[in-house]
Image: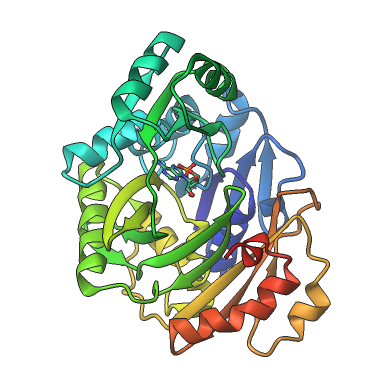
Amino acid sequence: MMVGVLGAGQLGRMLALAGVPLGMRFRFFDPAPDSVAGHVGELVVGDWGDRATLERFARGLDACTLEFENVPVATHETVSATVPVRPGARALATSQDRVLEKSCFERLGIPTTLHRAVDTREELAEAVREVGVPCVLKSRRLGYDGKGQCVVRSDDDGALDEAWRAVAGRASIVEEFVPFDREVSIIGARGADGACVFYPLTWNTHAGGILRLSVAPAPGVSYKQQVDAENALRAVMEHLDYVGVLTIEFFERDRKLIANEMAPRVHNSGHWTIEGASCSQFENHLRAVCGLPLAVPFCRAAAMVNLIGSHAALPELARVPGARVHLYGKEIREGRKVGHVTLVGDDPVDVYAATRGLRAMANDPSLRTP
Ligand code: AMP
């Protein structure tokens, strides 16, 4: 089976590593010729709008998916004319726009942040007055890892001008600032037949907007929280007629879950499933996309530490008993995700405690915050 993947970063690379044992072969499409999934499959290089190259990419594929949520919807449609691309264009369009995403949560009765859409500087002033300060201004589209967003602490003209500059005057959203207790995510998959499987809620710690640490299951998570998260994810997947892995990220406050955003793809907070689950998020995504039955994942406790901007600690990390090191083959650049390390155990609190040494080796700045 030849599987096409739009985008060829580390997520695509991990999809291929999961799919090869199932007899799958991979062809990736990406504008960047040095994309790291090219090390494990065929890489077709072209711009997202390059129809001829997209058609050449699509020819002969048995199934196609994406590993990058900012693939233009028009690109998705071009490839879909030759081979079905899963998840579909509606799911992609919804998750590319923070306003559509939040409206989707609201329509389905999933608690989300209070928010207002903002198109102009005048609307920004009105929205900040309505939502109240502090609040968060985010560009509607193309934001990731905390880019294109800022916290607005005052509704005076100077503060609003500065915020408007931070989003470069683009169509945006103003959201209430949630003083969350922690951030958690749920990952699940839906097959073309409507069957769904879920992984346990995962606790995520960010620093500078970048994910640093994930622990699963999130310590202290209740059965009700897991069920609420699964029901929310199932509702979104059914609403969007979704096929593949979908992730929802939540803020947790006073044990309640508030949906922040969704990602229509395999997710960094699920990398632990490679070693910590009987079937990883990557394999379940491929099963869904290729029309195979999904596998109910049996999971152990696990923790994942991201390697950001450096893997100089590789020799040290490789010496830690039980630590599984993944390097993505990327050129080192500040703030870039270049690898991760996973530990697996019986109790998430113990596994979390055991990550302290790994995080020190990985120079995790969130270790320094109380
Ligand atoms: P996002 O791009 O929406 O995932 O935001 C990146 C990070 O900024 C989140 O993981 C949170 O740590 C923080 N953040 C985003 N939105 C809010 C909010 N409304 N209230 C508090 N913190 C937020």
The residue that appears at 30% across and 40% down in the rendered structure is 113
**Residue 146 in picture, x, y percent from top left:** 55, 41
Picture quadrant of residue 342: bottom right
**Residue 344 in picture, x, y percent from top left:** 53, 83
Picture colour scheme: rainbow
For this rendering, which residue is in front, 363 or 21? 363
* Residue 245 visible in this rendered orientation of the protein: no
For this rendering, which residue is in front, 84 or 359? 359
**Picture layout, residue 261 above or below residue 279:** above
Picture quadrant of residue 92: top left
**Residue 167 in picture, x, y percent from top left:** 55, 23
Q: How many marks?
A: 0
Decide if residue 111 is on the left or right side of residue 14.
left
Q: Quadrant of the C terminus?
A: bottom right
The residue that appears at 53% across and 33% down in the rendered structure is 150
Picture quadrant of residue 25: bottom right
Decide if residue 175 is on the left or right side of residue 55.
left
Decide if residue 204 is on the left or right side of residue 237.
right
**Picture layout, residue 116 above or below residue 337:** above
* Residue 306 visible in this rendered orientation of the protein: yes
Decide if residue 116 is on the left or right side of residue 28.
left
The residue that appears at 49% across and 56% down in the rendered structure is 267
For this rendering, which residue is in front, 232 or 137? 137
**Residue 95 in picture, x, y percent from top left:** 39, 37
The residue that appears at 52% across and 73% down in the rendered structure is 274
